[in-house]
Image (tube, rainbow, N blue to C red):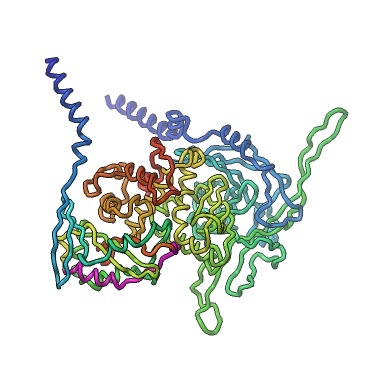
Amino acid sequence: MKKKFIITFAFFTLLALVLFSCRQDIGNLINPDAGISITDAQSWYESNKPQGVQLEFAKVKTSKGKLYGKPDWKHAYKVDHPDFTTVQVPLSVQGAFCFITPERKKAFETTGDKRYVESLTQMVVVNDKKTGKTTGFLMTIIPDKEYQEATNFKAFYSSYKKWQKGYSGLIFYHTLEGKFTNGWRFANGEVIKSITPREDSGIDLQLKTPSAQKASASSDCIDYYYEIWSQNCTDWYTRYEGYSSYNGTSCGSWYQDGYQYAYTECYYSGGGGGSDAGGGSSGTSGSGSPSSSMTAIAANILLDSEGIDLFNKALDKLLEQCGYSTMYNYLTGMHFNFNTVYINPTGTTGGYNYETGDLTFKDNSAITSGLAEEFVHLFQDHYYSGGMAGYIHNANFEFEAKVIQDLECMINTGFCPYYGDPDSNSPNYTNWMYAVTKNNTYFPSYDDLLVRYPVCNNLNYLDFLNAFSTNPAKPLYNLPVIPTLTPQAIPYIKNNPCN
Amino acid sequence: MIMKTIIVKLILLIVLIFSNTVSAQTIKKTIKEKSVQGTTYVLEQYGSEKVNIKNKNGKYEQFMKERGKDCESFAIQDQDASVFTVKKIAKNVFSDARIKQLSGDDTNNFGVLCICNQMGEIKAVEFIRVKTSAITLQEIKVLEDAFLKMKVNIYNRCPEVRYFKFTFPVRFKDYI
């Protein structure tokens, strides 16, 4: 009897272990459509690829000009996350290249160990499970020298948002066209610094002092660069009559091939004496410089220094509020951003063009009041399945964006103009706002917004939407209402509080 | 037996059909006037214990009529970015003990409707969804006087608009 019990117990334990270890595969079997496959990623890439993956990193001028590469789909692999799936694709590059930190450069020069001259760039295709949206970019892993040594040079086992245990080093992101977008510095598995591109177009970085660390024109700040090293490789073939056979590849020596701007650290003197008195601050949020938050949400910034400062302030204020912070995290996590930000004097206060991704303001003074709404539109465009282009120009998107602004204002106790109010002479919308936010303490669900409260004349979200779309005082928004288009940004904020 | 089942189902169906109508009730608006220190306030009550309060001689409605068309996309911020003026005012009007007492129940929060001119000067206020069992009319008067001295910054103000309407919440737990 005892023996039978032990056998049965062992069998079920074994079964449980097998099931546990295979839970992801089982999950995939149950839900095989979750995320995209490698084939889907390849199809997406074929439809969206630039003319070859161009590894012309940032504005760096390498001696050879552009390095061309192509995805090596045979070695691609899929990584599943709760909200998205990634397909990581190694690159097959003409020659070899790497980003090298000053410490690793020194170690290579001292020891001659080529493993110090290694970084890993892969293409990442990300598919959002909810919206089905797919995007792609290049990700480069540049481990610190110490981390390389601590892992016995096995420092490249990170994939997008699944970082190797205790990872220390840099992660760079570039567009598929090779433009540097942003990056992160890790220490012991934690992000400790964001890295933003510098918008000093027209300046050849090679003209700056070719040192890994160099004082900038402002004596209080230091620009950090990482060197790019390259290696020329040659494939050898023996030609016979009618055919040739591959005889291997040989590569020349590593050589310094350019510089990648990494980040700027500024130090503030303690007043008097001119010495650096500690209290160092990182980032680029000084006067006229785009903050790291700004560069993460806007690819090209064509504002003057006053405009940049106003944008920085307006964005900082938005990100103090949970709902905007939630949307921001989604957008930056998926590498979605405004394309170009500029002033359009003939345009409206603020405008988001979903066809170009551009963000415009009528003038600098419109940035403070106009950013929030266009920011919500950017989120809507990327979060709604099919984006804004998938629908006729409608009042639904506009009204949802205004309600979000009003709700955020209510629960963050600001001064609220009630952008969504279809009739400012009536107290209904005001009373509705107080009712649905439970006196400024609660971000409502869409179901909450459908409740009819007597205090606001039994009107709900849909009634206000219809009134908004026909409000003669706001002809700009006299647009059709799509009855089947239910709000999606509001539920996202509700379900992802400050993620 | 079958008949009984059919009747029960029919009753359920009828209840379901009319359930939406049942919840969408209308409520009666009650209007009262009360005076404190020579100032008369109009209290409008919409069924619940929450009351909208406005100064009988206040000019909120007059400014609303005179303000011109709606300004499409303006923003209001404090003149001093480092402090929320409303908090400063609330802490002057209510003692710390009183704030602590009021902050214990979120239903004690209320809203303030404001009208300001192009200069950002507050010209009229109304109080909305005030729980009169918690907030006294005396406190409302002191708040009104203080808010009418307040000044805000307006961004992207439409030049053709004379007055701007906005609201802000009074949330006691923020003032502890």
Identify which residue is drawn at 47% across, 31% down: A33
Of residues B144 and A377, the one nearer the viewer is B144
Identify which residue is drawn at 39% across, 51% down: A473
Of residues A253 and B32, the one nearer the viewer is B32
Tell me: A456 left or right of A314: left
Q: Is residue A102 visible?
A: no
Percent of width and height locating residue A303: 57, 62
Identify which residue is drawn at 18% across, 30% down: B15
Tell me: B163 left or right of A151: left
- Residue extending farthest to the bottom is A273
Of residues A112 and A234, the one nearer the viewer is A234
Of residues A64 and B122, the one nearer the viewer is B122
Is residue B144 in the magenta section? yes
The magenta stretch spans which residues? B138-159
Percent of width and height locating residue A379: 46, 48
- Residue extending farthest to the top is B2
> How many marks do you count on the picture?
0
Up-down: is A52 above or below B67? above
Percent of width and height locating residue B83: 36, 70
Percent of width and height locating residue A13: 36, 32
Q: Is residue A385 visible?
A: yes
Q: Specify the quadrant that holds the N terminus of chain A.
A: top left
Up-down: is A223 above or below A133? below
Tell me: B73 left or right of A353: left
